[in-house]
Amino acid sequence: MNRKNAIGVVVSLLIFVASFLFTGAAAAYWNLAAFLVVISGLTAAMLLSYPMEHVRNAFQVARNAYRNGHASPSEIVTTLLDLSVKSKVDGVLSLERSAAKATSSFLRNGLALLVDNYKEEEIRETLNTEMAFFNLRRQQSERFFLTMARVAPAFGVAGSVIGLIGLLMGINDTAVILKNIPVAFISTLYGLVLSNLVFSPIAENINYSTRVELLNQKLVLEGVVAIGKEQNPYKLERKLTSFLTPSEREGKTETLRRITRKYVQKRQAPVEPAGFQERLEQAGEVTEAA
């Protein structure tokens, strides 16, 4: 979660909690019996629906979705363009060091396949399989929290029914009535808050994080295949930026030129691959003309 989102969440929650305090009876919104009815029911439903290993994994995925900031697609494109130029200058085997330094496991795997001289079809098959099972695992975690969001209000209603039954059982006893009325109403509140403020947002955040990661993985797949085919970096830039929004595309051609100059300056002209600079310049002229 980025800093702006974190600040927004904290401020919103403070206002939400303050709204209960403004009623002048904040203590009335805490009821242990209502809380236990909702939480125990949710826990039982959770364990009846999923194995414990899946439950732990779902909470771990949720935690990582908030704590681990993923690279933006624009940053992935820049990284792939850098690797493309590097492979042109130093050869594909030079990417082995880049693979070891890559923070993305998917990018590391893709570069490892490239360095190990896998064919294009084999690279696509391997990485597409990894993408498919990554998406499947994330969908399972998302479904877990959607299930919790669906059943939480039901246990809130169950708490209300329990409270109303207790109220009717002591219809002639004012003390019993006053004891059971909070359970009848507050358990519903707990169920609604857990569903709409906790479980549903977590499920949606996992969904959003998954979509961004899948886009990044698709970019890596296309970039790695293009590098293996020794595609011109300017053509690769055109291809990869088609995945980006118009605002994210701005400046990518200039970024590629800076990357190219960086690598060319590191090498003496005789050491550069024959015709490398000329091919880049020709591609640049085509890009500018377009």
Image: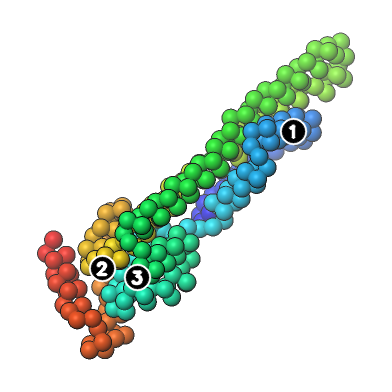
State if disc 3 and disc 2 touch (CB < 8 Å): no
Of residues 204 and 141, the one nearer the viewer is: 141
User: Dot 3: within a 10 Å radius of its alpha carbon, few (fewer than 14), some, or many (20 or more) residues?
Assistant: many
Q: Is residue 182 left or right of residue 85?
A: right
- Amino acid type of the residue tagged 2 in the rendering: Glu
Q: Quadrant of residue 84?
A: bottom left
Q: Is residue 204 left or right of residue 168?
A: left
Residue type indicated by callout 1:
Ser
Q: Which mark is residue 40?
A: 1
**Left or right: 175 as drawn, with respect to 133:** right
Q: Residues within 10 Å of mark 1 (few under 14, many from 20)?
A: few
Q: Position of residue 220 (x, y in %)?
A: 37, 59
CB atoms of marks 2 and 1 within 8 Å: no
| Quadrant housing residue 278 | bottom left
- At a point 68% along the width and 42% down the height, the residue shown is 52
Mark 3 or mark 2, which is nearer the start of the sequence? 3
Label 2 crowding class (10 Å Cα cut-off): few <14, some 14-19, many 20+? some
The secondary element bearing badge 2 is classed as loop
* Mark pair 2, 1: CA separation: 59 Å
In this view, the residue farthest toward the top is 172
Residue at the disc numbered 2: 230
Looking at the rendered structure, the secondary structure element under dot 1 is helix
* Mark 3 lies on residue: 83
Q: Position of residue 197 (x, y in %)?
A: 59, 38
Q: Mark 3 or mark 1, which is nearer the start of the sequence?
A: 1
SS assignment at label 3: helix
- Disc 3 marks which amino acid? Leu
Of 290 and 24, nearer the camera is 290
